[in-house]
Image (spheres, rainbow, N blue to C red):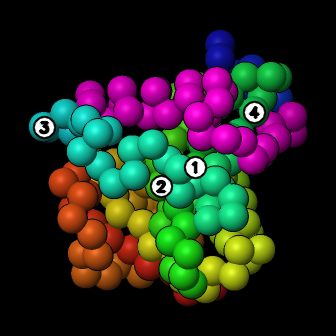
Amino acid sequence: MDIVASALGRGRIAIEEMDPRGDDAGYCLGEYYAELARRFESGFDVSLSRNPEADDMIRPRGAFLVAMSDGLPIGCVGLKGTGSEIAEIKRLWVAPSARRLGVGRRLKDAAEKAVRHLSIKTLRLDTNRALPDALQLYRSTGWSEIDRFNDDPYPDLFFEKHL
């Protein structure tokens, strides 16, 4: 029934910028980390990833966006700034009940729009083969596969997009 409610309320989904350490963002991140732990063969430990505190996902370096529906968080994406013209898309997640409604694409588009206000010209991201929906989204929206650009232990695919 959740998917029906989400579909009927598609027009009421809003993308809001939030502090990644806040309650709604924290809920999304906790669900994201739990899903990665279930889907990755070796599990997932956020402390081993780059910038686990997400402090580079706060203005003026970056941004953190949360999709809200009827006052509930249903998805998130981080924009991790570096202080240069290159930034990373991180932690794109959509609640299972809201998948297939275009929320992931809306979050990604909102992150791409946010970079324009931060003087960022190139976006990068990393992902894992265990996330085929993410791979399909990136490949279908103009991202190009590139060589590894970080030493994070979990990704095995790397992408870039020039804005």
Label for residue 77?
Answer: 1
* Contact, mark 1 vs mark 3 (Cβ under 8 Å): no
- Horizontal and vertical percent position of residue 87: 52, 72
Residue at the spot 33% in from the left edge and 54% down from the top edge: 50
Most extreme residue toward the top is 1
In the shown orientation, is residue 3 left or right of residue 41? right
Marks 1/2: CA distance? 6 Å
**Quadrant of the frame with the N terminus:** top right
- Horizontal and vertical percent position of residue 37: 27, 31
Looking at marks 1 and 3 on the same chain, the residue that comes earlier in the sequence is marked by 3
In the shown orientation, is residue 6 left or right of residue 84? right
Q: Is residue 94 in view? A: yes
> Dot 3, crowdedness within 10 Å: few (<14), some or many (≥20)?
few
In the shown orientation, is residue 139 left or right of residue 16? left
Label 3 sits on a secondary structure element that is loop
The three-letter amino acid code for the residue at tag 1 is Val
Frontmost residue, 146 versus 65: 65
Decide whether residue 12 is among the magenta residues: yes
Q: Is residue 111 in view? A: no
* Contact, mark 1 vs mark 2 (Cβ under 8 Å): yes
